[in-house]
Image: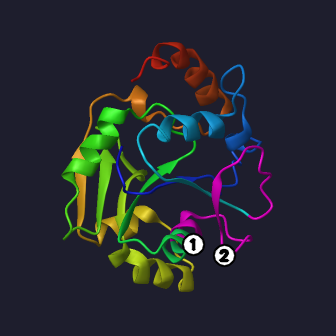
């Protein structure tokens, strides 16, 4: 197990899905959030949920509530997490990427260095800003982004000391953003039950 904290980001609008992705039924007895939380607890000693104040707590977790409930952007979640955790770095992951493996997460952790601002996963089709390690050196930049109402993580990473780590398995980085991707994730779920 690693001592670096893990923060699962759940504070999005889920507008393309039409309902809160975190509470989609994923296994027979678990929501997507529960599934993600339980598997990440096998990797990280401390797992936190980044969420809005009004989100229902349906199982016992350590929550980091957004400092602003009216802004639906990761910027708010990162500021809230740094202010709550008081750590030099943490691992950020979105609730809607349930297939990123322990090996891939460990690779990101191993590749991270103290002089970096961030270490982020990348596949051949795109980068994955909500899968990687963020350092406290970025906290002032997040504050500035909030002040300027600019919330693109890609812009921040491109203008910071970011290390990108390439991975080949596209299915592992599937984002569940809409009903068709949700259906694909359910089809992929069975073989990924043995991901460890």
Quarter of the rendering occupied by the N terminus: top left
Residue at 66%, 75% (x, y): give it.
67
> Does 54 lie within the magenta span?
yes
Q: Which residue is mark 1?
A: 80
> Does 72 lie within the magenta span?
yes
Residue 63: x %, y % from top left: 65, 59
Residue 160: x %, y % from top left: 28, 72
Q: Residues within 10 Å of mark 2 (few under 14, many from 20)?
A: some
Asked whether disc 1 touches disc 2, contact meaning CB atoms under 8 Å apart, the reply is: yes
Residue at 53%, 84% (x, y): give it.
148
Residue 34: x %, y % from top left: 64, 37
Residue at 46%, 77% (x, y): give it.
142
Q: Secondary structure at mark 1?
A: helix
Residue at 76%, 42% (x, y): give it.
18
Q: Which is nearer the N-term, disc 1 or disc 2?
A: 2
Applied colour scheme: rainbow
Prevailing secondary structure class for the magenta stretch in the rendered image:
loop
Residue 19: x %, y % from top left: 77, 42
The residue segment tinted magenta is: 53-78
Q: Which residue is mark 2?
A: 67
Q: In the picture provided, is 20 more to the left or to the right than 34?
A: right
Quarter of the rendering occupied by the C terminus: top left
Total labels drawn: 2
């Amino acid at each position: 197990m690693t001592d670096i904290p893990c923060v699962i980001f759940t504070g999005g609008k889920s507008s393309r899905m039409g309902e809160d992705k975190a509470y989609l039924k994923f296994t027979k007895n678990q929501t997507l959030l529960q599934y993600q939380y339980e598997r990440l607890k096998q990797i990280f000693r401390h797992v936190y949920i980044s969420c809005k104040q009004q989100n229902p707590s349906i199982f016992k977790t350590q929550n980091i509530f957004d400092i602003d409930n009216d802004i639906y952007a990761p910027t708010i979640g990162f500021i809230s997490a740094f202010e709550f955790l008081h750590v030099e770095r943490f691992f950020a992951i979105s609730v809607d990427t349930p297939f990123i493996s322990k090996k891939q997460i460990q690779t990101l952790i191993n590749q991270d260095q103290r002089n970096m601002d961030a270490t982020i996963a990348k596949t051949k089709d795109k980068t994955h800003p909500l899968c990687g390690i963020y350092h406290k050196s970025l906290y002032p930049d997040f504050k500035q982004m909030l002040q300027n109402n600019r919330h693109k993580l890609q812009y921040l990473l491109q203008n910071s000391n970011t290390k990108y780590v390439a991975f080949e398995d596209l299915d592992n980085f599937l984002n569940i953003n809409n009903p068709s991707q949700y259906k694909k994730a359910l089809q992929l779920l069975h073989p990924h039950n043995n991901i460890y």
